C-alpha cells in the first residue's frame, strides 16, 4: 500500500493539471473518487492515463439531490479537488464554506490558471497563456526566432499538477496536527513563476540576458548545452557544463584545444557551436552513444516519447508500465517501505456509483430514489 493509504480524495472531473494531481495521489495509495457528470455520460470509457487507479461516481450537480449526495460524500473525505473556474462551485452549492461546514477537517484544493482572484481570474486561458506572463515562454526558443511552447509541461503539469500535489500533502500534514482543514489556491501562473526561480538569480548576478533568448547557458546559447543532429538525422543532447565534464567531451569527441579551449567565452559560443554542429554530423546517434553514453560527458540520445520506454535505462528501472492497452509512465517517486502502485485501469463513468455510495452509508432505497430522479447514474 502506498503512503497515502487510508486517505479519501474527491476529484471533480476536469482536464489537465487537476486530473494529473489526483492521479499521483491515487498512485500513492489514496482512494480517489472522480465525480463525473451524470447526464448523458453513462458507459463512456475513460481512456486517458490520468484516470488510472480512480473510481467513478456519476452525479448531476444541477440537481439538489445530486448536490446533497456530494456533500454527504464530503463528510467522508479528506480532500476535495476543484478544477472549476472561480465561483462555479459556489454557484453549485459546493463551495469551500459549505463543504468545510460539513467537514471541518477537509482540505479543499482549488486548481485554476490565473488564481482565485485578480484581474484575470474569470478569463479563459491555457498553459501557453499562463507561462507567457511569467517570463517562462519568452525565454524558450532559438536566438532571433519566436518563443517555442514547451508542450504544456510548464504551466499545466510542472506549475499546476505538481503544485497541487505539494499543496495537498502539506495541508494534510498540517491538518494532522491542528485537526482543521483549509482552502488551497493553486494557480498555474503562480507555479510557472516559481519554476523560474533560478533564472531570477542568474539575472541578478549578471549571468543571464533576459532580453535575448538563445544566448544563455541553459537556453541553447552555449555550445556545450544543446542538442545536435547526427549523420542519420537523429539527435543527441549534451550538458557538459562543469569543466571536468567539458574536458571529457573534448577528449571523446576529438575537439581541439585551439577551437574549443575557451569554454566560458560567450563571444566564441556561436563559432564553437557551428564547428561542433559539423563534428556531430560525422557520426550516427548510435555511434555517439557508443562513445559517450554512460560517461560523465552528460550525454543522452534524444528519443521520441514512444521510443523512450525501450531505452535500456528505462527498462532496467521499470519506468513505464502497460495498462488499458497503453504504454504510460510508472508511479513516481519510489518509496522503500510503502511503494506506490497502480491498482487498476480507468473505470467507466459511473461504474462505481453504487458501490462507493453504499460504502459511505447510502441505503439501497436511497440509491434507487436518486437513480430514478437522475441525480446519480
Image (spheres, rainbow, N blue to C red):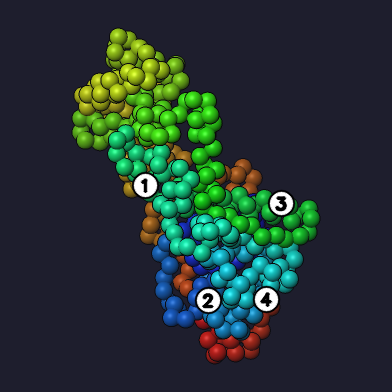
The correct choice, above or below, for 190 with respect to 283 in the image is below
Question: Viewer-proximal residue, 28 or 179?
Answer: 179
**Which callout, 1 or 2, points at the residue further toward the start of the chain?**
2
**Is residue 206 visible in this depiction of the protein?**
yes
User: Contact, CB < 8 Å: mark 1 with mark 2?
Assistant: no
Q: How far apart are the two marked residues, 3 and 2, measured between alpha carbons?
A: 30 Å
Residue at horizontal 55 percent and vertical 89 percent from the top: 373
Q: How far apart are the two marked residues, 1 and 4, measured between alpha carbons?
A: 42 Å
The correct choice, above or below, for 81 with respect to 151 in the image is below
Q: Give the secondary structure at mark 1.
A: loop
**Which callout, 4 or 2, points at the residue further toward the start of the chain?**
2
Which quarter of the picture shows residue 43? bottom left
Q: Which mark is residue 72?
A: 4
Residue at horizontal 47 percent and vertical 62 percent from the top: 123
**Which callout, 3 or 1, points at the residue further toward the start of the chain?**
1
The correct choice, above or below, for 275 with respect to 285 in the image is above
Q: Which residue lies furthest to the top in this view?
A: 258
Q: Nearer the viewer, mark 3 or mark 1?
A: 1
Q: Give the secondary structure at mark 4.
A: helix
Question: Viewer-proximal residue, 292 or 167?
Answer: 167
Residue 91 coordinates in the image, percent (x, y): 59, 75
**Which callout, 3 or 4, points at the residue further toward the start of the chain?**
4
Horizontal side of residue 220 vs 125, given as left or right: left
Question: Viewer-proximal residue, 362 or 122?
Answer: 122
Q: How far apart are the two marked residues, 3 and 1, measured between alpha carbons?
A: 35 Å
Q: Residue 173 carries which label?
A: 3
Q: In this figure, which residue is indicated by the disc labeled 2? A: 58
Amino acid at each position: 500500500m502506498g503512503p497515502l493509504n487510508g486517505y479519501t480524495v474527491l476529484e471533480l472531473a476536469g482536464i489537465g493539471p487537476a486530473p494529473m494531481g489526483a492521479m499521483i495521489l491515487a498512485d500513492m495509495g489514496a482512494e480517489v473518487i472522480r465525480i463525473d457528470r451524470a447526464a448523458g455520460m453513462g458507459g463512456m470509457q475513460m481512456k486517458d492515463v490520468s484516470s488510472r487507479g480512480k473510481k467513478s461516481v456519476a452525479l448531476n450537480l444541477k440537481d439538489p439531490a445530486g448536490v446533497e449526495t456530494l456533500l454527504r460524500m464530503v463528510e467522508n473525505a479528506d480532500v476535495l479537488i476543484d478544477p472549476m473556474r472561480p465561483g462555479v462551485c459556489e454557484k453549485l452549492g459546493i463551495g469551500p464554506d459549505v463543504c468545510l461546514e460539513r467537514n471541518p477537517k477537509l482540505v479543499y484544493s482549488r486548481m485554476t490558471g490565473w488564481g482565485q482572484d485578480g484581474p484575470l481570474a474569470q478569463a479563459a486561458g491555457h498553459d501557453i497563456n499562463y507561462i507567457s506572463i511569467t517570463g517562462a515562454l519568452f525565454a524558450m526558443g532559438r536566438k532571433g526566432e519566436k518563443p517555442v511552447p514547451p508542450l504544456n509541461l510548464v504551466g499545466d503539469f510542472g506549475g499546476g499538477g505538481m503544485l497541487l500535489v505539494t499543496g495537498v500533502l502539506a495541508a494534510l500534514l498540517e491538518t494532522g496536527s491542528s485537526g482543521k482543514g483549509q482552502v488551497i489556491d493553486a494557480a498555474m501562473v503562480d507555479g510557472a513563476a516559481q519554476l523560474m526561480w533560478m533564472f531570477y538569480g542568474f539575472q541578478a548576478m549578471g549571468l543571464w540576458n533576459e532580453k535575448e533568448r538563445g544566448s544563455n547557458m541553459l537556453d541553447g546559447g552555449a555550445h556545450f548545452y544543446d542538442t545536435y543532429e547526427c549523420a542519420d538525422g537523429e539527435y543527441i543532447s549534451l550538458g557538459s557544463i562543469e569543466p571536468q565534464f567539458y574536458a571529457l567531451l573534448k577528449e571523446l569527441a576529438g575537439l581541439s584545444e585551439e577551437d574549443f579551449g575557451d569554454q566560458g567565452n560567450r563571444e566564441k559560443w556561436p563559432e564553437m557551436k557551428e564547428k561542433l554542429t559539423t563534428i556531430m554530423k560525422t557520426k550516427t546517434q548510435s555511434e555517439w552513444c557508443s562513445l559517450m553514453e554512460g560517461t560523465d560527458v552528460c550525454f543522452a540520445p534524444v528519443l521520441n516519447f514512444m521510443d523512450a520506454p525501450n531505452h535500456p535505462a528505462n527498462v532496467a528501472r521499470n519506468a513505464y508500465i502497460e495498462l488499458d492497452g497503453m504504454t504510460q509512465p510508472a508511479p513516481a517517486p519510489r518509496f522503500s517501505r510503502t511503494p506506490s502502485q497502480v491498482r487498476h485501469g480507468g473505470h467507466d463513468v459511473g461504474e462505481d456509483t453504487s458501490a462507493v455510495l453504499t460504502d459511505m452509508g447510502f441505503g439501497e432505497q436511497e440509491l434507487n430514489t436518486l437513480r430514478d430522479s437522475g441525480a446519480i447514474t
